[in-house]
Amino acid sequence: MTHPALKEWSAAVHALLDGRQTVLLRKGGIHEKRFEVAADVAQMRFLLFPTVAHSHAERVRPEHRDLLEAAAADSTEDAVVLRAGARVVAAIAVERPEGLTDIAPLHIWTAQSVQEDRLDFRPRHRLTVLVVSAAPLTTPVRLDRAPEYRGCSSWVPLPVSPTWGTPVHDDEALDAVAQQVRDSVA
């Protein structure tokens, strides 16, 4: 049995668990026509597959760089450590990119990273803000890195049956975040 996992920067996974982040900004990987949340995934929790690159430090705002060291240990050449998953509360298409500055407190990325890595990357593709309800796994899961986990795709099936902990934020708080995002970018 497999469970879907969304690839995301390891520092962002730690920020979600720490309560510092409530949104993900997605366009999709190089091998995808567009980013999509399948209907079955939108109705359930998915795992967060941690990724890391040396360039992440300069793409994270200084007040959140303390997350980088612990986050790097979750994604190595040999293994990944799954600590969390999420459920999509709202998927909001960005119609007004200038409003992204208004939602900066909802994530850890620098304005330059949002511009270059999300808006300028594949400019014909629509950026989507995912408001997510993150939850820790009751026990982190270590997986040996396998060839099928590589590549520039957003989703990867993993041979894991997770046990979920309590979500970081309640639904009422996340509904307010979703409204803030709609007011800013939709």
Image (cartoon, rainbow, N blue to C red):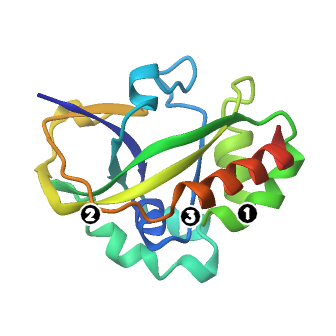
Type of amino acid at the residue the image marks with label 1: Ala
- Return the x and y of residue 47 as percentages of the image width and height: 31, 45
Type of amino acid at the residue the image marks with label 3: Gln
The label shown at residue 113 is none
Depth order, front residue of 26/162: 162
Type of amino acid at the residue the image marks with label 2: Asp
x 47%, y 82%: residue: 66
Q: Is residue 39 above or below residue 44?
A: above
- Return the x and y of residue 40 as percentages of the image width and height: 39, 22
Q: Is residue 134 above or below residue 62?
A: above
- Return the x and y of residue 98 as percentages of the image width and height: 89, 48
Residue under label 1: 104
* Residue 52 visible in the shown view: no
x 28%, y 61%: residue: 165
Task: Give yes or no for contact between labels 2 and 3 (Cβ–Cβ under 8 Å).
Answer: no
Placement of the N terminus among the 4 image quadrants: top left
> What is the C-alpha distance between the residues marked 2 and 1?
25 Å
| Lateral position of residue 137 relative to residue 42, left or right | left
Residue under label 3: 21
Q: Is residue 47 above or below residue 139?
A: above
Element type at mark 1: helix
Asked which quadrant contains residue 91, the reply is: top right
Residue under label 2: 74
